[in-house]
Image (cartoon, rainbow, N blue to C red):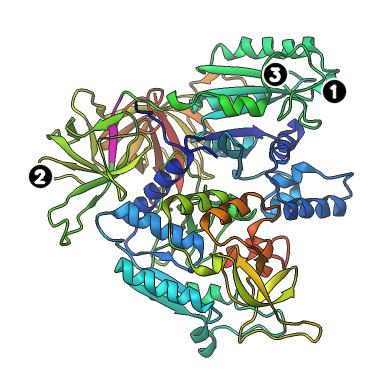
């Protein structure tokens, strides 16, 4: 007997595929912003579904801060090869070398904010008119206000108080030369939905998400991985712990959690019992109450 | 969660005074959807602002301006999940100057929660919210009679509100209206059954949302498939593949079905219905699939595949209920781009039949301006036919937006009468 309704994951999947196809139909030169994190992997997986049996008809773009987990870069290159699509890399190191941005100083320095300039430069030089991202509305309060199709002016800026109304599923991607859009196909997914779907579809994700032994240091309430970029304080000490990462950003700012979850099944179980939001381990969001809103206004992801 | 759990989208319109934010905060808090770091942030802000205890309403704050002014300006989306369903709340502001945001939030909702203060009964704002819910054809309306604690949990006060509401709502087109007496502040009948209102035999709000039948909300009769894009892989395994990619708007398509392509009128049969995982025997709303046909026909974005024995009407003159969304008023006889499913044409507003006073629901045939937040019945002429169903029968193929080509802004949203 047939049931003529979709379950929640199928409905979210169908919605995301619809958005991705709208992007392809309404823009000349879209890209998927690919960070190697689970959300951009999910968007890429959904794009594969949206255009099957054709391959994904646009490139992936990685804004490379130079402060990567090596696992992420390996994963990125494998997925590009598997999909047979082009990879565009915007390099923060190049932006620094060209004097476009200046490196932050001090122990808590990150390249997080520097990415904005590199991203906008890459969008401009590659004439990209829509950058598809894995942003979700449940992540953060400024993101809760995002549209599926989100307009950016010719300086790449977001004007949250003056957004285009978005009714039903009619998306308006019209824009003038020099402006671009951000599109968010998984706007309506929560962290839990993402994990349940990854588990269901058995989507490959970087090993960093699974519990593993790693050298870490305890800083700002989470386990920061040891790397060539880490500057130790006197009282800090590097130890080996079994950790996993809930989100993946720069190796310098992404904190791990102690965990034994080494399968997708266990990760989904663990996430469902979490009492902290996933961005709680991201020091970029801890800077102020409107840290995300401020960065987004300037052109952040 | 179970595999057959559904997604329910509901909207809440109202202002802080109605207890809307408190209600949402309560739903999220009691269903354990608020994380500790979020709660910590709210506690800090409550303390900074000098509030006593934790102000759950702060959880719905978004942008910096909204926090500073203590109001909701834009639609914000909230999420929570119970063992029975996943929920998306479109949290919209309730004041008259934000009608357009309410309309936006209502456009995708299965259900609307309308809050009535038990002390004040049905007021203009209640009527406005109910009218918008009915105009946007939200299938289910739940009237929450709130602040029952302030009227001593009196059944009589509750019944008075019901009578008032039923009297005025007889004019509205809503299929399913339910009433629940609640206290959002104290949690009565929100997630847990109230100990203070034995006289109320119905279910609390959350249980109502969890069990409400929504599978029939989508039109299952009229098969409509607007083509978004054409997939032509031209690779080894799919050399001659030509798939029409889209999302089923309504109805059911089966392999072998006789279909007509609108507007060209060519007919063919469905050969395959494809997804990455498998080829399907049938596809129904709201599934995203790729359809191939037995015959080679010229089909592109904007065309619609329908079943041959049930076709929408190709129309160039349409009457719509139009909500004006933009600061700039409508320019008389100006040309706009009109979007209807994946189709785009040019259009002109030929006539304004009447404007609705959304405080009184009276019709005004004299006022011919279309300003922000106005809701009017208008006549529109398009350059080419659109494949139209009435909004009442089909929310997807009965809705349009207008875009101003000089600014690229979305300026109006319409529902075909």
* Label 1 sits on residue: B150
Task: Give the magenta range.
Answer: B222-226
Chain for disc number 1: B
Q: Are marks 2 and 3 in contact (CB under 8 Å)?
A: no
User: Do the residues indicated by labels 2 and 3 lie within the same chain of the protein?
Assistant: yes
Give SS at disc 1.
helix
Calculate the distance from the C-alpha at mark 1 to the C-alpha at mark 2.
69 Å
Which label lies toward us, 1 or 3? Answer: 1
Give SS at disc 3.
loop
Of the numbered discs 2 and 3, the one sitting upstream in the chain is 3
Q: Is residue B411 left or right of residue B343?
A: right
Residue B197 in the image: state x and y as whole percent.
79, 16
Residue positioned 67% across, 44% down in the render? B33
Residue A25 in the image: state x and y as whole percent.
31, 53
Q: Is residue B255 left or right of residue B325?
A: left
**Circle 3 Cα neighbour tier, 10 Å, few/some/many (<14 / 14–19 / ≥20):** many
* Label 2 sits on residue: B296
In this view, the residue in front, B352 or B112, is B112
Q: Is residue A123 visible?
A: no
Of the numbered discs 1 and 2, the one sitting upstream in the chain is 1
Calculate the distance from the C-alpha at mark 2 to the C-alpha at mark 3.
59 Å
Residue A216 in the image: state x and y as whole percent.
67, 77
In this view, the residue in front, A298 or A111, is A111
Calculate the distance from the C-alpha at mark 1 to the C-alpha at mark 3.
16 Å
Question: Where is residue B78, by image quadrant?
Answer: top right
Question: Where is residue B281, by image quadrant?
Answer: top left
In the image, which disc is placed on residue B122?
3
């Amino acid at each position: 007997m047939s049931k003529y309704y979709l379950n929640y994951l199928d409905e979210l999947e169908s919605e995301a595929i619809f958005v991705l196809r709208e992007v392809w139909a309404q823009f000349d030169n879209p890209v998927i912003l690919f960070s190697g994190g689970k959300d951009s992997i999910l968007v890429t997986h959904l794009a594969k579904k949206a255009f099957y049996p054709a391959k994904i008809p646009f490139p992936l773009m990685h804004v490379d801060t130079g402060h990567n987990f090596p696992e992420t870069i390996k994963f990125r290159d494998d997925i590009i090869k598997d999909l047979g699509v082009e990879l565009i890399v915007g390099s923060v190191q190049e932006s620094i070398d060209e004097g476009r941005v200046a490196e932050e100083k001090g122990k808590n320095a990150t390249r997080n904010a520097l990415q904005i300039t590199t991203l906008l430069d890459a969008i401009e030089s590659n004439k990209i008119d829509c950058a598809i991202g894995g942003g979700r509305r449940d992540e953060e309060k400024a993101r809760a206000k995002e549209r599926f199709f989100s307009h950016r002016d010719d300086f790449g800026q977001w004007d949250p108080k003056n957004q285009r109304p978005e009714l039903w599923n009619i998306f308006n991607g019209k824009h003038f030369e020099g402006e671009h859009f951000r599109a968010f196909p998984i706007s309506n997914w929560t962290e839990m939905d993402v994990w349940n779907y990854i588990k269901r579809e058995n989507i490959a994700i970087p090993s960093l998400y699974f519990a593993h032994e790693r050298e870490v240091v305890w800083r700002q309430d989470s386990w920061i991985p040891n790397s060539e970029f880490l500057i130790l304080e006197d009282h800090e000490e590097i130890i080996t712990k079994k950790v996993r990462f809930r989100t993946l950003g720069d190796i310098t700012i992404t904190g791990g959690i102690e965990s034994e979850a080494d399968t997708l099944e266990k990760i989904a179980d663990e996430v469902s019992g979490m009492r902290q939001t996933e961005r709680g381990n991201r020091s970029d969001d801890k800077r102020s109450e409107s840290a995300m809103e401020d960065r987004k206004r300037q052109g952040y992801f | 969660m179970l595999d057959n759990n559904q997604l329910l989208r509901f909207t809440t319109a109202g202002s802080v005074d109605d207890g809307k934010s408190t209600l949402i905060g309560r739903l999220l808090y009691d269903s354990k959807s608020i994380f500790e770091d979020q709660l910590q942030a709210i506690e800090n802000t409550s303390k900074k602002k000098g509030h006593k205890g934790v102000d759950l309403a702060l959880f719905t704050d978004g942008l910096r301006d909204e926090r500073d002014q203590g109001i909701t300006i834009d639609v914000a989306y909230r999420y929570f999940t119970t063992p029975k369903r996943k929920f998306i709340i479109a949290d919209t502001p309730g004041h008259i100057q934000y009608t357009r945001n309410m309309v936006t939030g209502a456009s995708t909702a299965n259900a609307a929660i309308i809050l009535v203060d038990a002390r004040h009964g049905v007021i203009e704002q209640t009527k406005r919210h109910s009218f918008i819910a009915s105009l946007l054809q939200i299938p289910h309306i739940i009237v929450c009679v709130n602040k029952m604690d302030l009227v001593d949990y009196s059944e009589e006060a509750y019944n008075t509100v019901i009578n008032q509401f039923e009297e005025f709502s007889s004019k509205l087109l809503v299929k399913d209206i339910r009433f629940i007496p609640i206290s959002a502040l104290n949690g009565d009948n929100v997630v847990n059954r109230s100990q203070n209102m034995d006289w109320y035999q119905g279910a609390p709000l959350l249980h109502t949302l969890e069990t409400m039948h929504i599978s029939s909300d989508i039109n299952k009769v009229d098969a409509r498939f607007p083509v978004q894009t054409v997939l032509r892989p031209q690779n080894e395994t799919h050399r001659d593949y030509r798939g029409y990619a889209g999302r089923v708007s309504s109805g059911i398509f089966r392999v072998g079905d006789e279909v007509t392509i609108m507007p060209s009128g060519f007919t063919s049969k469905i050969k395959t219905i494809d997804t990455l995982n498998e080829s399907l025997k049938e596809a129904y709303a709201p599934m995203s699939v790729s359809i191939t046909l037995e015959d080679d026909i010229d089909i592109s974005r904007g065309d619609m595949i329908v079943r041959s024995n049930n076709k929408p009407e190709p129309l160039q003159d349409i009457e719509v209920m139009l909500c004006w969304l933009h600061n700039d008023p409508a320019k008389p006889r100006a040309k706009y781009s009109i979007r209807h499913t994946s189709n785009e044409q040019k259009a002109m507003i030929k006539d304004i039949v009447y404007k609705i006073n959304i405080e009184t629901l009276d019709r005004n045939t004299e006022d011919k301006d279309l300003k922000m937040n106005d809701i009017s019945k208008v006549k529109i002429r398009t350059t080419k036919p659109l494949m139209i169903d009435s909004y009442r029968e089909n929310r997807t193929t009965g809705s349009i937006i207008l875009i101003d080509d000089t600014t690229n802004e979305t300026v109006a949203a319409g529902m075909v009468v």
